[in-house]
Image (cartoon, rainbow, N blue to C red):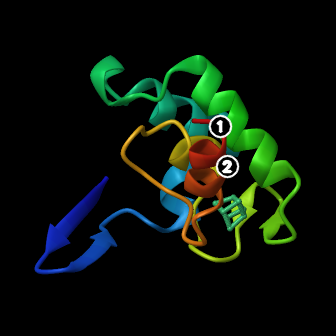
Amino acid sequence: MGETEGRVRYCRKCLIRDLMEGESFYVSLKNAMDAIPEEDRSPQQEYDRRLELCRACERLAEGMCRACGCYVEVRALRKNQDCPYGRWEAEHASNE
Ligand code: SF4
């Protein structure tokens, strides 16, 4: 899980091999998503909307955002996360 030190955020467990040991990669991602507390999660409709925007984005590659390096299915699940290019917010604002 990410930690904050000043204004720089970093992750202490970023190596894929740490995530993959003994499990498929997807199962590891699913476990990471399942560990996100309910109160920190995006509502299902917002989650689906974010993922549709990522699907249409040229920066998506094999589930990873090339702008931020996150797996978008995990990033989009956290309600307080955003798209590094503001695409989730811009779309959201136009719907209000
Ligand atoms: S988070 Fe933003 S930049 Fe990254 S893949 Fe999704 S829409 Fe594209």
Query: Going by the image, does 41 lie left or right of 88?
Result: left
Label 1 beta carbon within 8 A of ligand 1: no
Q: Quadrant of residue 11?
A: bottom left
Name the amino acid, label 1. Asn
Ligand 1 image-quadrant field: bottom right
In this rendering, the answer to whether 27 lies above or below 93 is above
Residues 93 and 43: in front is 93
Q: Position of residue 28 (x, y in %)?
A: 57, 39
Q: Name the spot of residue 94 as percent of width and height, x first.
A: 65, 46
Point 55% across, 53% down: residue: 89
79 lies left or right of 8: right
- Secondary structure at badge 2 equals helix
Instruction: Locate residue 7, reporting x and y percent.
Output: 19, 80
Residue at 76%, 53% in the rendered image: 54
**Of circles 2 and 1, which is in front?**
1
Residue pictured at 45% horizontal, 67% vertical: 14
Q: Quarter of the image containing the C terminus?
A: top right
Q: Say which amino acid is labelled 2.
A: Glu
Answer with the quarter of the image where residue 47 lies: top right
Along the viewing direction, whichever of 71 and 47 lies nearer the viewer: 47
Q: Which mark is residue 95?
A: 1
Task: Between residue 2 and residue 44, name the one nearer to us.
Answer: 44
In-front residue for pair 22/77: 77
In the rendered image, residue 50, in percent from the top left (x then y), is placed at 67, 42
Disc 2 target residue: 91
Q: Quadrant of residue 44?
A: top right
Check if mark 2's residue and mark 1's residue have beta carbons within 8 Å: yes
